[in-house]
Amino acid sequence: QVQLRESGPGLVKPSETLSLTCTVSEYSSDYEYSWVWIRQPPGKGLEWIGGLFLSGSTHYNPSLKSRVTISVDTSKKQISLNLRSVTAADTAVYYCARAKGVVIYYMDVWGKGTAVTVSS
Amino acid sequence: QSVLTQPPSASGTPGQRVTISCSGDSSTIGSYTVNWYQQLPGAAPKLLIYTNNRRPSGVPDRFSGAKSGTSASLTISGLQSEDEAEYYCAAWDAGLSGPVFGTGTKVTVL
C-alpha cells in the first residue's frame, strides 16, 4: 500500500512561511487519485487545507486560499505545502493524504503527520 | 463553510453497540456520500467507512455506516477496548468545494 511521509521544520516564526513536503512511496499517475493537505490544531478537529489533482490544478479552502500554495514534483514523488504569513493560529499537526476521486473525493491513505508550532 | 455536527462523546462496555450520529445539511450530506475516520490516540486518522457504508479491506465488520437524508451514523457492534478513539464523519461541501469534517466524537470503552 502507498505510504506518505510528511517532513519540514517543527518551528516557524510568526509572519514567515511554513513549508512542508510529503514524500510518496508510489506516485501514481492514475487520474483517479488526488493529493490533499489537512491540519489539526492541538486538541481540535480536522480542517481541509487544499488539494492537488493529477491534472495539475489545485483548489484551496477559501479561508486559507490567499496564503496557500500546493505543488508537486513528480520526479521526486513529493507534494509540497507552502503557507505564508503564519500566526499562532496555524500551529497544528499537518497531514498529507491521498484522495480517491477525480472531482469529489475522500481521503483513503494518510501520512503520520508532522507537528508545526508557530512561535517566536 | 458548513459544519457536520457530532456528539462530543459516546461510551459503552465491551460487547455493547454504540452509534454515533453526524448531522449535516443539503450542501453536504444531503447531496454527497459520507465517510468516517478513526483516530487512535496520538495517531493519524484512518479511513473506516467510505461511500456511506463500505468498509476498506482490513476494517472489522463490527463497524457499519448508514445515511438518511442530511444525517449519517456510524455503529460499532460489539465494542472492543481497541475501539477507544476519536471518530470523525466527513462529506463533500458544495459551498466549500472541498471536504468538511465533523466535530468529532470520542468513544470511551468503560
Image: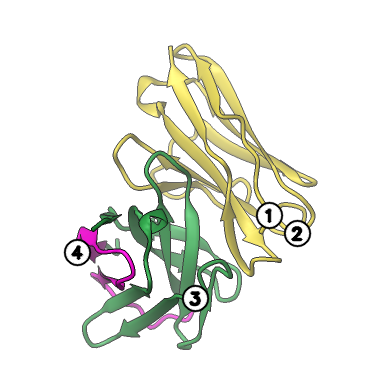
Name the secondary structure under disc 2.
loop
Residues at marks 1 and 2, CA–CA distance in whole angstroms:
8 Å
Q: Which chain is yellow?
A: B
Whether residue A25 appears in magenta in the rendering, the answer is: yes
- Mark 2 touches mark 4? (CB < 8 Å): no
Q: Is residue B51 visible?
A: no
Dots 1 and 4 on the same chain: no
Which residue type does callout 3 highlight? Glu
**Which residue was labeled with disc 2?**
B27
> Image check: A46 left or right of B89?
left
**Which residue was labeled with disc 3?**
A32
Residues at marks 1 and 3, CA–CA distance in whole angstroms:
26 Å
Of residues B50 and B44, the one drawn nearer to the viewer in this rendering: B44
Would you identify the image quadrant in which residue B33 lies?
bottom right
Q: Which mark is residue B2?
A: 1
Magenta extent: A4-33
Q: Quadrant of the N terminus of chain B?
A: bottom right
Badge 1 density bin: few <14, some 14–19, many ≥20, Cα 10 Å: some
Looking at the image, residue B92 lies above or below residue A23: above
Residues at marks 3 and 2, CA–CA distance in whole angstroms:
23 Å
